[in-house]
Image: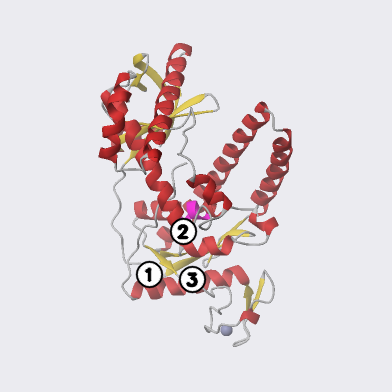
Amino acid sequence: MQVKLVPTPVQAAALKHTLRTVNEAACWVSGVAFARGVPREYELRKHTYAELRETGLGAQVAQHVIKKVRDAYTSLHANLRAGNLGKKGSKRRIKVESKPIAFRPQAAQPYDDRCLSWQYDAQTVSIWTTAGRLKGVHFACSPNALKQLTTHRKGESDLVERDGMFYLIATCEVPEAETREPGGFIGVDLGIVNIATTSTGYRAAGRKLNRYRRRQLALRAKLQKKGTKSAKRLLAKQRRKESRRAKDINHRISKTIVTEAERTGRGISLEELTGIRERVRLRKPQRVALHSWAFAQLGEFIVYKARRAGVPVVFVDPAYSSQQCAECGHVDRLNRVSRAVFTCRGCGVVAHADRNASRVLARRGQGAWDAGRTSHVPATSPRS
Ligand SMILES: [Zn+2]
């Protein structure tokens, strides 16, 4: 859960300086880690902790900096292994492997309860900074979010700076509802033209989002050409805005799907995420339309909302789901007449292609459930 801080100018300056300082420290630790072949956390601590303390960082904060660096390498390695950064020897991969991870001056810094305390009634926090402990820093949030924070906040929160504003991203542990036995499954087909199509008739068209992304892309090309400092800043802002927008849309789509499943007593059948990544490797104009991370995020949101609602989720192999008939099971490449139309060569049924695919996935979900596979959570995406 994210809350926006409303600091006084003096408090804002202290927060800004703090993030700058800890991220400079993180860059230094990252350099040490890189030079030493990225040792384990306790080993890395031996080489960096004392020096961090000497620069004036508190014990807690120094530990958090070291852990943050080690965690960043862990998720980088996981991404390399998963092939998210290109093949071995590719230009992109060599670029990330050849130098230490860098931390932006505004990058997120984790805070535990010793460095950050919450006063929910007053809507303030007390937070450690390089200028000492700041007390009574106001934060803004809705009454609903405040209730959620008060009852479920637990563990660490991240302090981040975005476009000159400060945010705290708090971890909330919401108890999961008990998973119930589903009466059937909703199949969810993911795609570019239709972001999500379900076997129960819901369709989230990607038209608006795709058009928006194309516009952003044109704007970005223009800014990149300019190459000035202000253009770069604008570029970064644009990128964040775009990812916020995709996130909003994913929240809406996942909510609709999970609510539908809850209402009708069904489970949800999703494509395995690796499958999605494969499928998103499309022709260039479409590739820019929607990135694989957006689909991965949609999958994550569905899983997380489903868990809270007690709706079971199964992941199924999406292979040939676009060529198989949901009525008779016949698989034929020629069944898929065009992007939108499915006509079965076996039984003659005509259907919307995405709807047919979602029904195939629904069937496979039921099959997987019956075979005794329970829901599992996919690997989380890297923190950005
Ligand atoms: Zn058929």
Say whether disc 2 or disc 1 marks the residue closer to the N-terminus. Answer: 1
Q: Count the marks.
A: 3
Q: Which mark is residue 183?
A: 1
Question: Could you tell me what secondary structure mostly forms the magenta stretch?
Answer: helix
Q: Give the structural element (helix, strand or loop) at label 1.
A: loop
| 266 shown above or below 370 | above
Q: Is residue 296 magenta?
A: yes
As measured in the structure, the alpha-carbon distance from the residue carrying label 3 to the one carrying label 1 is: 15 Å
* Residue 239 on image: x %, y %: 60, 39
Q: Which residue is mark 3?
A: 361
Q: Which residue is mark 2?
A: 260
Mark 1 residue CB less than 8 A from any atom of ligand 1 = no
Say whether disc 3 or disc 1 marks the residue closer to the N-terminus. Answer: 1
Mark 1 closeness class: few <14, some 14–19, many ≥20 residues within 10 Å: few
* Residue 256 on image: x %, y %: 49, 54
Callout 1, which amino acid? Gly
Q: Is residue 101 magenta?
A: no
Locate ligand 1 by image quadrant: bottom right
- In the image shown, does 376 or 80 lie closer to the viewer? 80
Q: Are marks 2 and 3 in contact (CB under 8 Å)?
A: no
| 260 shown above or below 75 | below
Callout 2, which amino acid? Glu
Residue 124 seen in the current view: yes
